[in-house]
Amino acid sequence: MTGTPLTHIQATLEDPRLQAAIYKASGRLMDHRRHAIDPEELPDFQELRTQANLLKRHTIENLDHYLEMFQAQVEAHGGQVLWASDGQQVADFVLELARRKQARLIVKSKSMTTEEIDLRDRLEPQGLETVETDLGEYILQLAGERPYHIVAPALHKTREDVGEIFSRRLGVPLENEPEKQTKIARAVLREKFLAADIGMSGANFLVADSGAVVLVENEGNARMSTTAPRILVAVAGIEKLIPRAQDLAVFLKLLGRSATGQALTVYTSFLSGPRRETEIDGPEEFYVILLDNGRSKLLADPEKRQSLFCIRCGACLSHCPVYRKIGGHSYPWVYSGPIGAVITPQFQGIQAAGWLPFASSLCGACGEVCPVKIELPQLLLELRAEIQKARARHSENRWEKLAFRAWAWVMRHPRIYEMLGMMAGAVLPGASPGDWRERLPRWAARGPLGAWISQRDLPPLPERSFRRVWRERLRAGKS
Amino acid sequence: MPRVSLFVTCIIDQVFPQVGLAMCQVLERIGYTVDFPEAQTCCGQPAFNTGYREEARQVARHFLKVFRDAEHIVVPSGSCTAMIVHHYPGLFANEPRWLEETGRLTPRLWEFSKFLLEVARVEDVGARYDGVVTFHDSCHGLRELGIKEGPRRLLGNVRGLTLREMEPAEECCGFGGTFAVKFPEISGGMGRAKIEAIRSTGAGAVVGIDSSCLLHIGGMLSRAGLDVRTLHLAEVLAQQ
């Protein structure tokens, strides 16, 4: 379909090393999740999913209320809330802040929201060094790539790849042991943490009733990024709200398990406001930027609003057989996998991303694993219908639509359906499966039949359809 | 004798008539009178999944008309059954008459293995199949209808049959309807992963409840030159 990055997809499919890396890493995430949600381990997993869905539904339906509550709480703690309608506004604020505070260096923790708005690319050309401190993100920053997976950004990189990137970009000797690689990164990043003027983070949750930014991580880098520098700027999508701190009892149980199979991640940080007078650490200034960037458009759509329930656990990616084949970089935006296929066309329009909802076998694995029960397969179907309507308005699917219209007519006329079936049997090659490739008429080879046999054989069509067999059977029985 | 109407699906009608016949034989063997409403064609899923809702509705109305008076409708496909049970209501959300028809029809509609186990309450149909098979979980049957243990229980009662599970059995084979021809490379890639899982079991046949998945899997096996048959569950159960 138009817009499909076929070359990239093909290259990924034909790279056995990359395929093995994706399968191994996503397979590991799947295994870990399966063990973590074992009924012996967590008997109320399905109830938790339902509860999380209801909580998110309630929050999204009353988002204005909770956003205002959150803002009031943050301000009561001495922090500031800023509202950004797009990435440029976020960058403008950070640049202005840096100018005012004479800041030169930002340390960042992992955040899909800042990836979404290409924040680094907006800051660095202005002379503001911005360093990713999550190991996976750091590797990708050095490699000049965007995240491959929502929770495992460098999922596609083997240890050899990482060794090569470090050696090339940091000038260190080639090192393929992950532990030693971590030490190399740590040595560089420690210096950055200590020298940084501004710490930036995303948010896993924004708690409305306590004005807290909740961060979930395993490396401790988010805690360092948000406590060592004297200024903290957290950037979060407006959908990250949850009503009460106690709701975390539901979400924290689901997030770690769904993402990496952890009952709880190593660090869970609650950031609420700047350092108090009696406290000895923490930032002196505390800013939360609430980003819209198209979210309010989704909010306006009652059918597809549930796309905003996503807590970015990445389970739908790891479990998606399409993602596992084409990898994260075949998707046009930072959000890949089924959730990417659902939100990208809504955020970026169907011209750029209209092919995505069609690039799915609709197997439903994503909907099955989603911890907040987003009906991903249903949304893909809804989007398909919308996209076809939009394509029809621009006559982009004229032949396909005509074909389906004719098909629907034939399907309502059983005699014609039967006749056409018989004609197909007579016209199309039969005998042995291999025949299809050699004997398919050229006109047919360009269409769906050609696409079919580009990958797999077709059995010879039977001499008689079931309905004819049935009729003969009836006649034989009666005589 | 109780009566069932077959909805054989368009793919079985046109490509795998032997599956329809096998289903017929099994149902007759356990005491049903089988009927085939000849005006049937398709459930409308190809149009629905490709985003052509109006075209899907037209075909769905035809289906509802054809099967309006059937006592039980048995379908040798999880996917077509799920289409009718799960997607017709949404498709007819603004058409009360057809919504009502759907509501009246769906309680009488059964995927083949579910019908055997839950309506006929037969676990052993007296079949015999000598050989090792593996079972592919078709996605819509598995995730929309919860069909997982049922077919395995039926296969467990087939004399001479050994079931060897593939790993992973629940990952999609890559068929996906028009997806298979819109994105043949991706579909083919998924199919190759699936046939590798099948091959690793050493089974002589892969059994499933959906002929559309089996068409794709069979085509992939044939292209790879692997000597593994594809069989619909009904074909195994019909053998004696």
Image (cartoon, coloured by chain):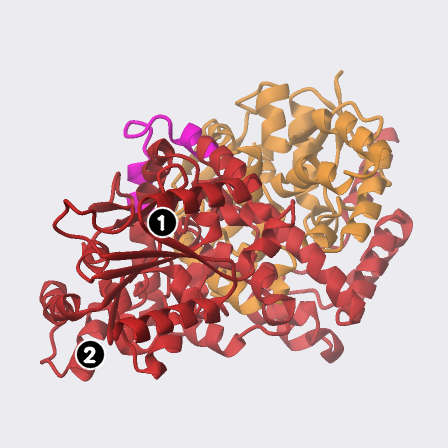
- Which-is-in-front pick, marks 2 and 1? 1
Residue B121 image offset from top left, x and y in percent: 58, 18
Q: Position of residue B100 (x, y in %)?
A: 81, 29
Amino acid identity at mark 1? Asn
Q: Is residue A40 magenta?
A: yes
In the picture of the structure, the residue carrying the numbered disc 2 is A164
Q: Is residue A421 magenta?
A: no
Residue labelled with disc 1: A204
Q: Are marks 2 and 1 on the same chain?
A: yes
Q: Main secondary structure of the magenta part?
A: helix
Against B46, residue B77 (above or below) is above
Residue visible at 77% across and 46% down in the picture: B42
Residue A475 at what x, y percent from top left? 87, 36
Chain A, which colour? red
Tell me which chain the residue with mark 2 is part of.
A
**Residue located 32% across and 78% down the image:** A144
**Label 1 secondary element:** loop
Q: Colour of chain B?
A: orange
> Magenta stretch?
A30-50
